[in-house]
Image (tube, helix red, strand yellow):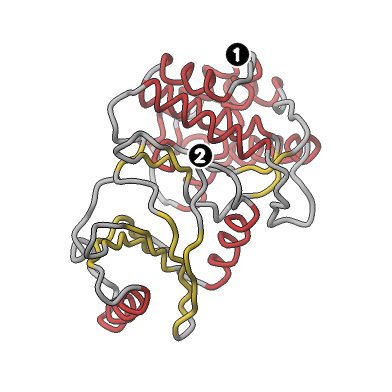
Amino acid sequence: MRELSSDFFQPTNQKQAMDFETILRSVSPSATHVEVSAGANRVFRLREEKGATSVVKIYATPTRERRERHALVALDKVQGVPKILSRGIDDGTAWIQMTDGGNWDLASLPRNLNILRSAGRVLRGVHESDAALTNLSNAIDNEQIGAHFRNTIERLGKYRRRLSLPADVLDQAASAGPPVASPAKPAHTRPFPNQFLVTEAGQVTLVDWEWATVAPPEWDVSLASWQFSKLLGDEAASAFLEGYGAVVSATRLRSWIAYHSAMLMLEAAEKRDGRLQDLAPLVADLADAVG
């Protein structure tokens, strides 16, 4: 993760900037800070006078903080998951201080097969934990995956021209049907390469647990390996799967890639106006997965 100066992202208003400064000073009055991520939530790295670092995440809403805190508490004993150091709510703004996962992430580092294997082991540890982890009334099961896949493919038809998505690709996706899901386990659900942070010593931490739930393990494994393959090549994806320690057939992976690519396209199409040419790689991935 590339460190950004605290003024890189302009605050929406001066009061918000002052609130962030107040929270950071309350966590550690003597620490310096840099902002490392900005969006709905803001993330800052604190550096103490003696060099120790931690991360403070300031949430857009208390609900988002509760979701992530629930996951972090449930996964507290799992290696490669951030640990909560302190937390609080200041004037309605919720925040968590947690252990620092490192300055880099697997989306920005050059390919390192050993670190990719470590990332696979971290994800396997999450799936093998018995954490009581869900933000839903029930776990995501095979029936729900099937219904959601069919609904996603149907809704994509509305945006087919904007996506330059051939009609026969949608027909092939519908005919291929949904991916087969194993029994649900604790899952991250969004393990993109930039969510795997890396320290100078090569330790890997999987961050951003706000959307964690109980879901089929193939959801995480397929999404992560697909993204590693796109970003760093097939050897990187193979190293990740080797670290994870389970054999997933190519056919099964392709069916899950069809699911993920369709979901990502639909999410973008429903949020944006105009042409969606930048999503051409997802169209190609869907066509390849169902062809």
In this rendering, the label closer to the viewer, 1 or 2: 2
Q: Which residue shows up at 72% across the image and 25% down it?
A: 177
Residue 248 versus residue 108 in the image, above or below: above
Taking the image as shown, residue 91 lies to the left or right of residue 210, namely left
Q: Tell me the quarter of the picture where residue 135 sits.
A: bottom right
Label 1, label 2: how far apart the Cα atoms are: 19 Å
Taking the image as shown, residue 110 lies to the left or right of residue 194, namely left
Question: Which label number is shown at residue 3?
Answer: none
Q: Residues within 10 Å of mark 2 (few under 14, many from 20)?
A: many
| Nearer the observer, 1 or 161 | 1
Tag 2 or tag 1, which sits nearer the N-term? Answer: 2
Q: Which residue shows up at 45% across the image and 30% down it?
A: 164
Quadrant location, the C terminus? top right
Q: Is mark 2 on a helix, strand or loop?
A: loop
Residue 142 x/y as whole percent: 78, 34
Residue 171 versus residue 86 in the image, above or below: above
Taking the image as shown, residue 252 lies to the left or right of residue 166, namely right
Residue 214 x/y as whole percent: 70, 45
Count of marks, rendered view: 2
Q: Is mark 1 on a helix, strand or loop?
A: helix
Q: Which residue carries the number 2 mark?
A: 191
| Nearer the observer, 3 or 73 | 73
Q: Which residue shows up at 42% across the image and 36% down it?
A: 193
Q: What residue type is labelled 2?
A: Pro
Q: Which residue carries the number 1 mark?
A: 250
Residue 58 x/y as whole percent: 41, 68
Residue 112 x/y as whole percent: 34, 23
